Each structure stands twice: as C-alpha cells, then as structure tokens.
Amino acid sequence: MHVVTLHLTTRHVKILPMTNSSPARRRSYRGQSPDARRAERRQLLLQAALEVVSSQGYSNATVRSLCASAGLTERYFYESFANREALLGELYQQQTALLRDAMLDAIAAPGLSTEQTMRTGLSAFFETLEKQPELARVILFEIFGVSKAMDTLYYQAMEEFAELIGELAQVLGIAEFSKPANDSMIYAGLVGAVVQMARRWVLNGYHESRESLIESSVLLFTAVSAHHQRQSTSS
Amino acid sequence: MHVVTLHLTTRHVKILPMTNSSPARRRSYRGQSPDARRAERRQLLLQAALEVVSSQGYSNATVRSLCASAGLTERYFYESFANREALLGELYQQQTALLRDAMLDAIAAPGLSTEQTMRTGLSAFFETLEKQPELARVILFEIFGVSKAMDTLYYQAMEEFAELIGELAQVLGIAEFSKPANDSMIYAGLVGAVVQMARRWVLNGYHESRESLIESSVLLFTAVSAHHQRQSTSS
DNA sequence: GTAAAGTGACAACATGCATTGTCAGAATGG
DNA sequence: CCATTCTGACAATGCATGTTGTCACTTTAC
C-alpha cells in the first residue's frame, strides 16, 4: 500500500548442515511443516524482543532472557538469528516499517491539501507511537548505542524519513529554499524536531494530548512552508 | 560569564581511610601537593576519556584502556571516580558545559537584534562542534545507550537547551504560540532539529560548510518566529 | 640513613555473557 | 515397533570486564 520501498532484505538464513549420505528427511511436527515451525519460532523471538527490549532495555535483552520470554531455548535463537545484534536489527527494521507504512497509508488518501497532508502524516506518526508504546520505546530510545551497525540503521532511517519529506515537499511545491540554506538539511532538521517532540512526549508518559503534539509539529511544518512561500514571492 | 547555572555538582570524592593512631601525613611529591597530584590525575583521566570515547566509542572505553591512555593505573581511576559510568557522566557534563558556555558567551554581546541573536548563538554552536570534533562525537553520538543515568543526563541537557530557547523567546518577544500548540514542545522541537542537523553534518565528515548549516538552522528559527508574529498580528 | 608514603605493574577474583555442545526423552513416519 | 528427527533443559567453554589486592620499587621527610 505504500510507495517508498526500502532496501532492507538482509535476512539471516542459516544453511543447515546436511550430510549427503543420509537424506535426513525433515518431518512435520504438531501438524506443522519444518519451515512453518521455524517461522513461528522466529516470530516468537521477535515478539519477545519487542517485549523485553521495550521494558528492560537492550542491554538487559540477553540471549537467555530473550529465549526465556519466547519460551524457547538458545538453540532456536541461533537457528533464526546469527547473533543478538541480528535480532535487534530485525526488530528495529520491523518496527520502523510499521511506523512508516502507517504514515504512508495515511497520506495516500487522495485530494489532500498541503497542510492536510502534513497533518495527516504527523497524526498517523503520533497515533502509532501512542497506541504502540513498545514500538515507541524501541524506535525512539532503545536503538541507541547498541553497535555501529545499529547506529547506521538508525541514521539510515532518519535519512529515509527526511527524503520522504523532501519528496512530499516537491510534490506539494514547497521545495527549494534560499541558496545558503540546504534543502535536505532542513528536511533532516524537521525530522529531528518531530522525533525530539515524540521523545519528550513518551518520556513524560504521554502527558500531553496527542492533538497538542500534532498541532505543535504541524506548526513547525507550516511555519517553514509559509516562510518559503513568502521568500519566493518577495524575490 | 554565562547566566544559566546547572545543578551538576555530584562530584565523586572518595574519603580516604585514615587511621587515627598514626596521623599518616600526606607528602608532597614531584613538588606538587597531594591534592594537586590527584587533580592532575583526574584531568588526565578526563582527557583520556575524551580521546578514547570519541575515537573508540563508549563500549571500548574500558577502565584498562582509559588508564592506559591516561598513563595511569587502575588504582588512580577509582581514586577519582566511583566507576566507569561516573567518569563518562563527568565527561559529558564537562563537554556540554563547554558548548553551552560558548553559545551563552556569544549571545551575551549587547545590542543584538532577534535574528542576530539566533544567528550568533547557532553560529557558536556549529563552530564549537567543528573546532572540537571530539566534543561533537561525545555529545552527539557516544552518549547514547550507556545507561539509564546517562540517558537522563542527555534528556536533561536537551531540556535545558530548550528552556534556554524559551527564555530567549520571551526576552525577544516571540513566545506564546496559538493555543493548541505547546510552547515548550516547540522549543524542544527546535533543539531536536538543530541537533539532528549537527549529527548529519558530523556524520558526513563536515562536508557542508559551516555557513550552510548556520543558514539552514537560522531559517528554521526565523520561520517559526515569523509565523508567530503573523499569527499574533492577524488575530 | 631510614621509615613511611607514593607509585606502577600486574595478578587475582568475581561476574556475566555469547556461543557451542551434550543428552535424555518425546513425537513422528512407515 | 523402532529408527530417526525434534525438542528442551542445561552443562561447558571461552572471553571480556569491573574491581580489588599484592608487592617490589621509588621518593620524600626528618
């Protein structure tokens, strides 16, 4: 349903060692094929990661605790993931995709004005964070300082959101600011602003109303948009 | 020289065990008093932390590596800091204070207009980050995910910067936005925007010119400021 | 000169963790 | 029924680290 595609296809698939002599046929178990069982275990681990990381933090999300939460043993962890970091990366990309798709689906509605598009997208952003607090914690807080690879994932995600805003700006006809300023830098700044608002919101236990958050963030966007229009008409 | 004072006086001072029977007189060494030597070692450790953390990351800043970089042994580490985290916290607050004071000193110049104040403060911000890349790495990147306490320090610092902007906004007469929006939330957003721009800048190896960064961030501030003035005059 | 404080190198201990390996028992297919 | 696969519990290994302790040596004070 969404337009922008991501390049996040680095799934870890372990090649099972299999001797050629004995075919080692794979059985179905509990009425499920081997692949189905494996996929189910993988999902259990991802769900456990969401729970443990969002509640205990990344550093406490040890392989043991993750497996305990998933009701599985360590062996099945390494069946689906090369290591702890791989699971966390997968989790982050999964949750980021959820948030992104929610926003893209929201602004895909036809016939929206410029401000309506901003408001709809930002509304979906904050609504997702409010209704899925575990997602919020993972995306906004627990991703940091895990590893270089995870940091890279985070900055890529920020850049993607900034690029998305840039594309929208072009479509909506508010791109290209005055020369000394840098368009993509401004989009990055807007993303940083909204994310910082969201962090503050979550950190305060969602004390403010979602409406307030939406209005505050829309104000930033409209201010920048209006500022641009004034500049281009006055020159 | 700066106005805003921080409440960061949680220095760790270890009480040396001292038997009452033998006075255990403390000697001067290498022409320095015991306190001077201790202070020097403490500074060596802070300097080492800046170097190691900015270049190797926090997780690689082990007690051993920190001591090796400082040319001291583990004993002197625990003489000045209760643990690894204490040193990191001290380092972060030290570097944050450097950045904050640079900005406060810059905008303390008398007779600045609203936009000049914004530009001067932001200019000092980016200039400090450019001329002290180790400070930039520690403040913008390596602080994350270290511990709950460090996260709290970070969010406090962000909040302080937001409050500073709020105070400036009041002095400059651009405070109080329309009701549904939240003033302090908008200030927090502006801080998040500038910080995100700075991260992107550092991450790209300071590829863009500092001027470009300043203009982009000033544009955000002036856009919000102008938007506010239009709103208050039109109502 | 000498006793005590200061120093530096490094061992020792405890801990926690990722990752791999073992093994007995349960479930399956034929 | 029975060989094989699958599963779960958990031991074993290896590694890195924080933190404390030891000890020989150096410098100071008197």
Image (cartoon, coloured by chain):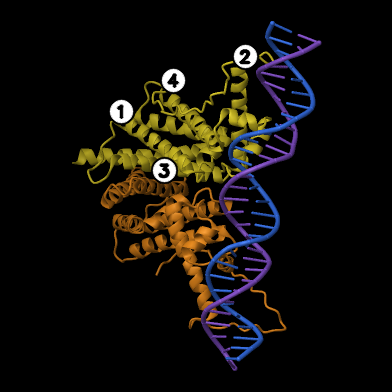
Chain colours: A orange, B yellow, C purple, D blue
Image height check: is A115 above or below B132?
below
Q: Distance between the residues labelled 1 and 4?
A: 18 Å
- Residue B40: x percent and y percent? 61, 22
Residue at the farthest left position? B235
CB contact under 8 Å: marks 1 and 4: no
Mark nearer the N terminus (1 vs 4): 4
CB contact under 8 Å: marks 1 and 3: no
Chain bearing mark 3: B
Q: How many badges with numbers are in the image?
A: 4
Mark nearer the N terminus (2 vs 4): 4
Q: How far apart are marks 3 and 2 (CA)?
A: 53 Å
Q: Which residue position holds label 4?
A: B1
Q: Distance between the residues labelled 3 and 4?
A: 26 Å
Q: Quadrant of the N terminus of chain A?
A: bottom left
Residue B101, numbered label:
none
- Residue A70: x percent and y percent? 47, 65
Give SS at disc 1: helix
Mark nearer the N terminus (3 vs 2): 2
Q: Which residue position holds label 2?
A: B25
Establish whether labels 3 and 2 are both on one chain: yes
Q: Nearer the viewer, mark 3 or mark 2?
A: 2
Residue type pointed to by label 1: Val
CB contact under 8 Å: marks 3 and 2: no
Q: Nearer the viewer, mark 1 or mark 3?
A: 3
Q: Which residue position holds label 3?
A: B192
Q: Which residue position holds label 1?
A: B171
